[in-house]
């Protein structure tokens, strides 16, 4: 590919990629709202095909026509009427596609990011024009994967997901339910422990123990310090800290000390986790948003951990207007991990934990940003 060629991001789900291939792989399309951008495409331009959900590069297309509008059915769930004709330059399978994390450290766009997760902002919408240097890097990686395929199984549930879209308009979101803590305060009695609460404790334990195994100090929410899981007391974890790094003002520290789990370096936070398993997911998100609002230049990964069946609800809440209005928006700073993905991932890596860094969580997590094809 020539450096004079224009590169564009083209987002697919596993389903829309299959439908594109099954239809002959000769036409790709975009939503009607993207028509002004699509009209800038020219024959010879290069489309970088990216699988959302599993965060992998799957193909390279060359534009072979001027843009046109057409509503002839190609895709099952969407029309994507803003179209261009294309030819396949390289195409991989989902199992041999290139993980985005393999390329991020080499990309021009990831230099001097304000936050470790800020790269996700470039993968939210298509078509999006890309820098030629990064475009060529992606093309070379896909071509190498075609010549020397490496099989990396994908999570089929994530591969089959449809792109997220916010259907609710500002002001139409539901009012959050009372949190467990609020209910206890109102009644004067501790609320009964449910299976969800037990899962919350289990996930706290897994994250605390993993952080400890990785050689990090760990912090558990102050009000959870006396909990235990399967007979293991949180307070017995050898690297559990009793004080936070003296780095923030008093108001920030009051917020941070109630976050479910923190991983700490010698003098700083390296990752923060809110676990959303109980009826309301709003209080944990408020803690995260308070932290972002009070420390807008905070440069640490933030993770929301919740059951797979609550994924859409968590992402909907993260994209509420009140959180989207933060600078940076909360959705750009937080990633989602399901309970099942965390359990499976930790089972695979636990024996190598002492050799790992917190960055491996990006492989287990997904962006909370709204994606469009």
Image (cartoon, helix red, strand yellow):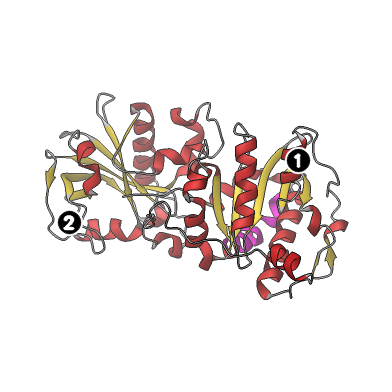
Q: Residue furthest top?
A: 4
Residue drawn at the location 70% of the way across and 63% of the way down: 182
| Quadrant for the N terminus in the image | top left
Rendered view: 183 above or below 315 = below
* Residue 122 percent coordinates (x, y): 41, 38
The answer to whether 138 appears left or right of 197 in the picture is left
The kind of secondary structure the magenta stretch mainly shows is helix
Q: Secondary structure at mark 1?
A: helix
Residue drawn at the location 78% of the way across and 49% of the way down: 219
Rendered view: 174 above or below 80 = below
* Residue 326 percent coordinates (x, y): 52, 39
Reply yes or no: does residue 24 show up in magenta.
no
| Residue under pointer 2 | 24
**Is any atom of residue 367 visible in this view?**
no
Q: Total label count?
A: 2
Q: Toward the viewer: 218 or 244?
A: 244
Q: Toward the viewer: 38 or 174?
A: 174
Q: Toward the viewer: 237 or 325?
A: 325
Q: Residues within 10 Å of mark 2 (few under 14, many from 20)?
A: few
Reply yes or no: does residue 344 show up in magenta.
yes
Rendered view: 56 above or below 279 = above
| Residue under pointer 1 | 253
Q: Secondary structure at mark 2?
A: loop
Q: Residue furthest front?
A: 186
Nearer to us: label 2 or label 1: 1
Residue drawn at the location 11% of the way across and 51% of the way down: 70
- What span is in magenta? 341-354
Dividing the picture into quadrants, the one containing residue 249 is top right
Dividing the picture into quadrants, the one containing residue 22 is bottom left
* Residue 71 percent coordinates (x, y): 13, 56
């Amino acid at each position: 590919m020539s450096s004079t060629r224009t590169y564009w991001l083209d987002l697919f789900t596993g389903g829309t990629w299959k439908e594109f291939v099954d239809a002959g792989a000769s036409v790709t399309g975009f939503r009607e709202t993207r028509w002004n951008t699509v009209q800038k495409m020219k024959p010879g331009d290069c489309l970088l095909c990216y699988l959302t959900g599993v965060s992998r590069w799957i193909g390279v297309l060359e534009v072979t026509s001027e843009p046109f509008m057409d509503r002839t059915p190609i895709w099952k769930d969407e029309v994507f009427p803003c179209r261009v004709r294309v030819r396949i330059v390289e195409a991989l399978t989902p199992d041999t596609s290139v993980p985005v994390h393999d390329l991020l450290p080499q990309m021009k766009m990831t230099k001097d990011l304000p936050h470790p997760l800020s790269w996700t902002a470039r993968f939210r919408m298509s078509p999006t024009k890309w820098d030629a240097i990064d475009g060529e890097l992606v093309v070379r990686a896909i071509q190498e994967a075609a010549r020397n395929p490496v099989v990396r199984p994908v999570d089929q549930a994530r591969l089959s997901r449809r792109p997220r879209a916010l259907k609710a308009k500002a002001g139409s979101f539901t009012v959050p339910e009372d949190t467990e803590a609020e209910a206890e305060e109102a009644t004067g009695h501790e609320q009964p422990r449910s299976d969800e609460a037990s899962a919350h404790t289990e996930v706290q334990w897994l994250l605390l123990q993993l952080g400890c195994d990785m050689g990090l100090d760990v912090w558990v929410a102050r009000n959870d310090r006396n909990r235990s899981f399967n007979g293991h007391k949180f307070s017995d974890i050898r690297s559990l800290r009793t004080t936070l790094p003296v780095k923030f003002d008093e108001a920030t520290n009051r917020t941070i000390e109630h976050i479910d789990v923190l991983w700490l370096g010698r003098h700083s936070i390296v990752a923060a986790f809110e676990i959303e398993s109980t009826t309301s997911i709003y209080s944990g998100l408020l803690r995260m948003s308070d932290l972002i609002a009070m420390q807008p230049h905070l440069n640490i990964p933030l993770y929301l951990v919740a059951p797979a069946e609550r994924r859409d609800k968590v992402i909907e809440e993260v994209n509420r207007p009140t959180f989207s209005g933060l600078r940076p928006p909360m959705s750009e700073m937080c990633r989602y991990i399901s309970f099942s993905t965390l359990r499976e991932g930790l089972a695979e890596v636990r024996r190598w934990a002492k050799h790992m860094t917190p960055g491996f969580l990006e492989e287990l997590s997904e962006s909370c940003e709204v994606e469009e094809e």
